Image (cartoon, helix red, strand yellow):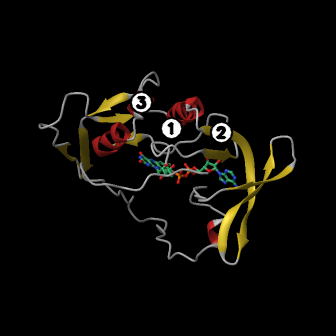
Amino acid sequence: MLQDGRRVRVIERDLNAPNRMAGESLLPGGYLKLIELGLEDCVDEIDAQQLLGYTLYKDGKEAHVSFPLEKFQSHVVGRTFHNGRFVQRLRKKVASLHNVSLEQGTITSLIEENGIVKGVQYKSESGQVLTAYASLTIVCDGCFSNLRRSLCSPKTLMLLPGTETLWLLHPLNTNSKSNQTS
Ligand SMILES: Cc1cc2nc3c(=O)[nH]c(=O)nc-3n(C[C@H](O)[C@H](O)[C@H](O)COP(=O)(O)OP(=O)(O)OC[C@H]3O[C@@H](n4cnc5c(N)ncnc54)[C@H](O)[C@@H]3O)c2cc1C
C-alpha cells in the first residue's frame, strides 16, 4: 500500500516494547520476505543471531537439519532475536515513513455501514473516544482478537495440552500476505 503511495494510519494499543516470548525465530524465507518489503534492516542492531538450521533431539539421538541456502547470498539466513526488539524496529521504520501515521490507541469497534467496514472507533492514549475512516481497514490484532469475532467465525486449530508443538514452515520463495493495521 505504501509503495502505491497510499496514506496508512496505524493504531496500536501499546507502543511500548512487548516483553513476552513470541516470534523469536525468523526462518530464511521470512528474511527474504523482509527484503521484498524493504524491511531487512529491522533485524539489525537488535542483537539478532544467525540461524542456519536446527538440531532435533529424540531418545538420546540427535539429527542436524540445515536450511538449503546454497543458492542464496551469505546474508540470507534465519535469525533469532528478542521479539520485542524486532517489533520496535518495525514500528520505528513505519513511523519514519512520510505517508504513515502511527499512534497509540485501542480500537473498540469497527464502524460498519450496510455491511461494509468504513473505519474504526478507538480510545486514544488520553482516553478520548475517536473515529477513523478509511477505504480499507485491516484488522490484525492478534490471535485473541475481539474484532475478528464481529466479522466471521473461523474454525480455529487448537493445540490440546500434551500435544506436540505445531510448526508451520514457510518455503523459501512463496508469496504470503503481509499484515498491517490501518
Ligand atoms: C511463545 C510463542 C513463541 C513463538 N515463536 C515464534 C517463532 O519462533 N517464530 C515465529 O515466526 N512465530 C512465533 N510465534 C508466533 C508469532 O509470535 C505470532 O504468529 C505473531 O506474533 C502474530 O502476529 P500478529 O501481528 O498477528 O499478532 P500480535 O503479534 O499478537 O500483534 C497484535 C497487535 O495488535 C495489538 N492490538 C490488540 N488488540 C488491539 C486493539 N483492540 N486495538 C489496537 N491494537 C490492538 C496488540 O497490542 C499487538 O501489538 C510464537 C508465539 C508464541 C506465543
Q: Position of residue 154 (x, y in %)?
A: 53, 75
Secondary structure of the residue carrying tag 1 is helix
The residue where tag 2 is placed is 102
Residue 100's image quarter? top right
Q: Which amino acid does label 2 sit on?
A: Leu
Labels 1 and 2: the sequence-earlier one: 1
The residue where tag 3 is placed is 43
Q: Which amino acid does label 3 sit on?
A: Val
The residue where tag 1 is placed is 83
For the residue pair 152 and 163, the one nearer the viewer reads as: 152
In front: mark 3 or mark 1? 3
Beta carbon at label 1 within 8 Å of ligand 1: yes
Secondary structure of the residue carrying tag 2 is strand
Labels 3 and 1: the sequence-earlier one: 3
Q: How far apart are marks 3 and 1 (CA)?
A: 10 Å
Q: Which residue is drawn at 43% across and 23% down?
A: 47
For the residue pair 131 and 154, the one nearer the viewer reads as: 131
In the shown orientation, is residue 65 left or right of residue 81?
left
Q: Where is residue 92 in the image (x, y as percent from the top left)?
A: 57, 30
Q: Distance between the residues labelled 1 and 2?
A: 19 Å
